[in-house]
Image (cartoon, rainbow, N blue to C red):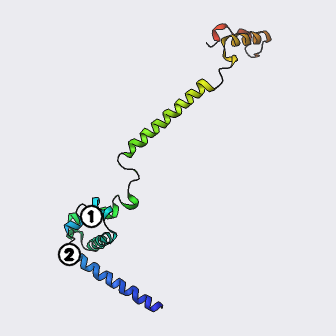
Amino acid sequence: MLRSQRLINTSIRRLQSTSLKQYAEVPITVGAIKDISTRWERMPTAEQSLILAKLKARQTQPWTEMTPLEKKAAYYVSYGAWGPRKPEYAEGDVGKVVLGFLGMFSLGCAVFYSFTTYVANPKPASNSIEWQVASDEYLKSKNANPWGGYSQVNQTGLTK
């Protein structure tokens, strides 16, 4: 069993190496790799694998023998924006994300403003100027501040 599996693997490797040598000698046709970046996603997998095999075989030869179109195709297949390297967002999606963020932010601000204006409790009575004057008078009578004496506070120190 092991020996037969080894024979199968060896024959597959030999077949692949001879087919790669065959591809390496002849340049790839221009029609197969022209505008590959626009056609790659729509190609059948058999054609993709054939082009990949041809490009792999051509790359084993000196790069001076490759045509510029083959070099561009090899670069796109290796590093192009397809498959896992495809951008997550398309060209117009950035504007949609920004508008969505601004819309949700303004909605949140509107909800916060309406809640604080209509639902939340009003300011406490201790924030009024009369309350502050009365508390200052009380503290003056008790001489509440031992360091400077609270009785030295005048009416100009109040907030309005």
| Callout 2 crowding tier (Cα within 10 Å): few <14, some 14–19, many ≥20 | few
Give the side of residue 153 with respect to residue 17, left or right: right
**Could you tell me residue 98's position as x and y percent?**
42, 40
The residue at which mark 1 appears reads as 73
Residue furthest to the right in view is: 142
Q: Is residue 5 above or below residue 53?
A: below
Kind of element beneath mark 2: loop
Could you say which is closer to the camera, residue 150 or residue 28? 28
Q: Quadrant of residue 159?
A: top right
State the CA–CA distance, disc 2 to disc 1. 16 Å
**Could you tell me residue 116's position as x and y percent?**
60, 26
Task: Name the amino acid, label 2.
Answer: Val
Task: Name the amino acid, label 1.
Answer: Ala
Q: Which mark is residue 120?
A: none
Could you say which is closer to the camera, residue 102 or residue 16? 102
**Could you tell me residue 117's position as x and y percent?**
59, 24
Give the side of residue 91 with respect to residue 21, left or right: right
